[in-house]
Amino acid sequence: MELKPGMSALVTGGASGIDSLAAAFEKHVQTYGGLDICINCAGIANRPLVYDDTSDGARTWRHAVNVNLVAVIDGTRIASQIMRSQKKPGVIINIGSAAGLYPMIFDPVYSATKGGVVMFTRSLIPLKRHGVRVNVLCPEFVQTNMGEQMGRRIVDSTGGYLKMEDIVNGAFELIQDESKAGACLWITNRRGMEYWPTPEEQRKYMVNPSKSKRTLTNNIYPSIQMPESFEKIVVHTLSHNFRNATRLERVRLRLPVEPHSALVKIIYAGVNASDVNFSSGRYFSGNPKETASRLPFDAGFEGVGIVAAVGDSVNHIKVGTPVALMTFGSYAEFTQVPAKHLLPVPRPDPEVVAMLTSGLTASIGLEKAGQMTSGKVVLVTAAAGGTGQFAVQLAKLAGNKVVATCGGESKAEFLASVGADRVINYRNESIKDVLKKEFPRGVDIIYESVGGEMFDLCLNALAVHGHLIVIGMISQYQGESGWKPKNYTGLCEKILAKSQTVAGFFLVQYAHLWQDHLDKLFDLYASGKLKVSLDPKKFLGVASVPDAVEYLHSGRSVGKVVVCIDPSYCQVAAKL
């Protein structure tokens, strides 16, 4: 929700009487003419411990339940009814507590009521259909009257009191992010702001996960003419020189489609540094002779397009659905793939291509391999490239200080525009010297894609307990003999001395997370929180693919390099 002048907000304080709470809402509506934002803030401690309480609980634990939980439920009920009657969007923030996420043994009743607030709020996601979003904020200790009753040792063990501005920032985050409904935002000094639970944890207990994003079937695109033949790029010789390894072939379009597959008309295909590794056979297991026996094979890792036909056994996706795919063979006008591998998307735009290999590598890699939280220093190498731009922005959105490396003024300007706190243009200054001078404690998370000397430099700059994520080594992909493995002497000794983690990240092994993270990236893009930069150089038609690959490896690109496979169809889609 965009905050505007004239909006009204009501903060409730846990009134224990139903009549008084209802009266507060009634008075607010009479005074301001409506209700846009409601914050239900209630919390009292319970003394004595419930298992030592010999009273009937009316003034102790029952009272705490009424204030901490019942009043929040009632406040949410009344606020949601007012907002729905107005027929305009509204946001409700319930103040929970970190004690609702993990046990608090020195006040079990407080922990129980806050846990109730969390689960109550998370169960209200259906209200979003009526324009009302309900979210819960769960901070650790704040320096209030109740917070000061806690022992100082307990507070210090969690990193000390949170600043009130942290709570305010969390509330604004939940109010303004349109994608958040039924969300729980956990705030700590130790980890910053993070959503709880993670999507991976959530999948463990979801019985009937929503299928809405996997059953997009609206055919809003012009009918697709099925040609007798189509063009594609085929690898015919194993070589790191992509142009020498491939050729443009015209092949017959085979119909009907296999029962469990779909035929996709590719509109945009993404170019990746690892295209040269694929054309040299690096991604196939087995000895060189076994790899050579696979020839010829189709090139290209990723693309977006429109479903042109489906097999008889495919019922979850229909002709006309815009989709993304990350299977071999995207450097083609048409490709047939198992329908289960298709990722429905709102539109087959080039920006979506950038979100695939590049965006997903950054999103999943930082979360899984980098264990990224908030309040860290994050370094991104080759940051102006296809995946670097996402790593910079996602790290910044998570509440971190971001350092980005690049070569060239235009790249430096671009990185500053997407939120990098410190841009190091290695053509003007030494990366090593800057890191040593400005970050003497080291860097907490490094997103590394260059390899070679850059890897050594990054390892030396890694902080105690730091995470170095290796997503590639583009500096080693080119050369007379192609990709040559390099020895990194002293690696074990260095990471042992500082309890560091060096983690490799290969996107193929995280396919189960692709749809969730793609949805997240698109939501951030649609809400204006994430910029997607495409390199301005145009590559049109399948025949331009080798030019695009060589351009990417020239080091001149800024943002994601894409190929418009069908220029005429791209123009039609753009008008839509």
Image (spheres, helix red, strand yellow):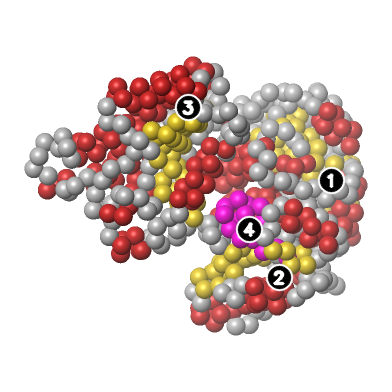
For image coordinates 24% across by 43% down, the residue present is 109
Mark sitting earlier along the chain (3/2)? 3
Q: Secondary structure at mark 3?
A: helix
> Measured from the top left, where is residue 252 in percent x and y?
85, 36
Tell me the CA gap for discs 3 and 1: 40 Å
Seen from the viewer's position, the closer of residues 455 and 209 is 455
Q: Is residue 403 magenta?
A: yes
Q: Of the two numbered discs 3 and 1 on the same chain, state the one appearing first in sequence.
A: 3
Q: Residue furthest front?
A: 31
The kind of residue on which mark 4 rests is Phe
Q: Earlier in the sequence, mark 4 or mark 1?
A: 4
Q: Looking at the figure, which quarter contains the N terminus?
A: top right
Q: Secondary structure at mark 4?
A: loop
**Viewed as shown, does residue 84 lie left or right of 141?**
right
- The residue that appears at 70% across and 35% down in the rendered structure is 323
Q: At label 1, which amino acid type do we have?
A: Val
> In the rendered image, which residue does mark 3 sit on?
126
Q: Residues within 10 Å of mark 2 (few under 14, many from 20)?
A: many
* Residues in magenta, as a range: 392-405
Q: Position of residue 95 (x, y in %)?
A: 40, 40
Return the residue at label 2.
451
Q: Which residue is mark 1?
A: 563
Residue picked out by circle 4: 506
Residue 518 point in image, percent of width and height: 63, 43
Q: Nearer the viewer, residue 130 or 86?
A: 86
Packing grade of label 4 (10 A; few <14, some 14-19, many >=20) is some
